[in-house]
Image: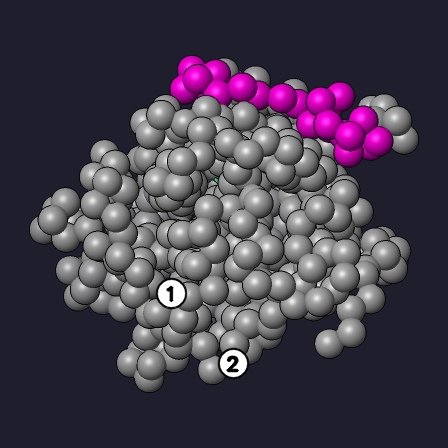
Amino acid sequence: MDTIKYTLTEDRMPTAWYNIQADLPTPLPVVRHPATGQPIGPADLAPIFPMALIMQEVSQERSIEIPEEVQSIYRQWRPTPLYRARRLEKALDTPAKIYYKYEGVSPAGSHKPNTAVAQAYYNKQEGVKRLITETGAGQWGSSLAFAGALLGLEVVVFMVRISYQQKPYRAALMHTYGARVVPSPSEETACGRAILAEHPNSTGSLGMAISEAVEVAVQDEHSKYALGSVLNHVLLHQTVIGLEALAQMEMAGDYPDIIVGCTGGGSNFAGIAFPFIGAKLRGERDVQIIAVEPASCPSLTKGAYAYDYGDTAHLTPLVKMHTLGSTFVPEGIHAGGLRYHGMAPLVSHVVRLGLAQPRAEAQLGCFAAGLTFARAEGILPAPEANHAVKAAIDEALRCKEEGVSKTILFNLCGHGHFDMQAYMDYEAGKLRDHEYSHEEVAMALAGLPVVAE
Ligand SMILES: Cc1ncc(COP(=O)(O)O)c(C=O)c1O
């Protein structure tokens, strides 16, 4: 029998997350204070995050136990299936073997609840009543709204205005879970008002929405801020994806030669790739890793590796990462979750160490790949996930050209059921490719902070 799905029973779900910091040959550069540029410690982050998450941020332990309550909520949709894309292989007529890990089976439709539930849990443990966050695609906002509903926390979401307009049903889903959704930039914060004064028609950006969320969180002792990507603890929580995939590839009697993930802030990519990179760093198995970003927001392929702020108003600490500059406002392409000026410090570091290769893809090719995938496998990917689909298909076609059979694993990080407008625009020929030019990058980078290292 040709197996299609490799499913783990609930008792085989990972009980600990994998922390790549334990295996890195060189440690991450220090985090610095946004005003002084001086290295900061855990206490400096306490106004915005609970201490348990701050300790995970700096932990060097290889394994961090998943609390029982988080495991029990994870079991609502985890372990997620690993599929062998036999029909796609046939459609491409490739000798390659293609596998995908499908995170779209979660309640919010993507990988984001893996960290939303964990973050809500630790905040609740420390007495926090309300979580404030931002969202681009709406996947993260929906996930935190879901986690808040299950764990009894209030949730406020600043949603990038263009996504709010493009995806009203995402906002409706957040409302359904009981969250309050505010299009950003908004009149509710000083930084939102400052942006609107200068750009009344601003479409917003993740950097702006983060500024608004942080501003509100620090002003209320019962509130904390939550971030859906970029930070070490977020990437840590996502490693359940790769840990499950390791066990499922073993069930399939296979091991990937190539792993592909799309990168916005880096969390689903890290989730699938880090456990495999860890095995490589420990000398167990080699693997090629590809990180795919949009050509219109190319932080890994065209950005600088430098200290930068995580937000537009410069309220967040300075971290060393691949960045397009915190003033960068990306084109309104539909992959809203990939429109962030920076990249996770851990993903940036891993790329700098040569452990993963970045690649930029324009959106039309990604939508075309998404349609090929949907017509073969039935699942309609989120526009973000289409970037991974595109690279996986390209690698499979390369195998065909070269007459080699490689095993390709990619993360299908979410479904696109709330993204039908984007698919309709694509089919109607309304979408355009936009490549971010070196000149535009140079202009955006001119404002990078000067940090003495
Ligand atoms: C479906 C989906 N994929 C990918 C991303 C990008 O985030 P990350 O790089 O952290 O996985 C998002 C972000 O919102 C998303 O919604």
Q: Residue at x 67, y 36 (%)?
A: 215
Q: Tell me which segment is drawn in magenta.
A: 173-195
Quickly name the residue at label 2: 26
- Residue at 84%, 31% (x, y): give it: 194
Q: Give the residue type that dot 2 points to.
A: Thr
Helix, strand or loop at mark 1: loop
Q: Position of residue 251 (x, y in %)?
A: 15, 60
Please give the name of the residue rendered at 51% of the width and 31% of the height, measured from the top-left corner: 222
**Is the residue marked by circle 1 packed among few (<14), some (14-19), or many (20+) residues within 10 Å?**
many
Of the image marks 1 and 2, the number of the one nearer the N terminus: 1
Give the residue at x 14% y 45%: 10
- The question of residue 186 being in magenta is answered with yes
Answer left or right for 127 relative to 360: left
Q: Give the quadrant of the C terminus.
A: bottom right
Q: Is residue 38 visible?
A: yes
Residue contact between numbered discs 1 and 2, judged by CB atoms under 8 Å: no
